Amino acid sequence: MTFRPSCYEAYWARAKARKELDQLDGALADLREAIKLSPKNLELHRFTMQVKAEIEAKPNANVDLRRSENSKSSSTTRRPPYHPMSVISSTPKKELESEV
């Protein structure tokens, strides 16, 4: 991007356009750049989660969804997608059922 590369809104706008054109890998790359410039913007993070979910829903997704392209981890296992409700209770389900 040549015009105001320090402006997260430009990356976000291009990410939205790419998503509409079904260019999800490009949209994800733009969102990563936007988040670098505005890491506390919750709307950017939500939109990124939506794009990642669409990528994962595609049958032949070949996009690397790791947070960092420079990851030094050699692990090939994938973690399940983060869900905000998964951190609410750390009590195992069996313990909750026995209390009822």
Image: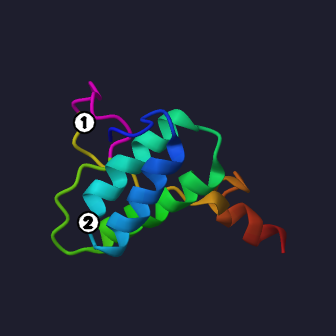
* Residue under the point 42% across and 35% down: 5
Q: Check if residue 67 falls in the magenta segment.
A: yes
* Tag 2 and tag 1, C-beta contact below 8 Å: no
The residue wearing badge 1 is 75
Q: Can residue 24 be seen in this view?
A: yes
Query: Based on the displayed image, in which of its 4 quarters is residue 75 positioned?
Result: top left
Part of the protein shown in magenta? 66-74
Lower position in the chain sequence, tag 2 or tag 1:
2
Q: Marks 2 and 1, how far apart in space?
A: 27 Å
- Residue 64 lies, in percent from the top left, at 24, 49
Secondary structure of the residue carrying tag 2 is loop
The residue wearing badge 2 is 23
Q: Is residue 21 above or below residue 63?
A: below
Query: Based on the displayed image, in which of its 4 quarters is residue 43 positioned?
Result: bottom right
- Residue 99 lies, in percent from the top left, at 83, 68
- Residue 90 lies, in percent from the top left, at 69, 51
Front position in the image: 61 or 31: 31
Q: Can residue 81 be seen in this view?
A: no
Q: Check disc 2 and give the amino acid type.
A: Gln
Q: Check disc 1 and give the amino acid type.
A: Ser
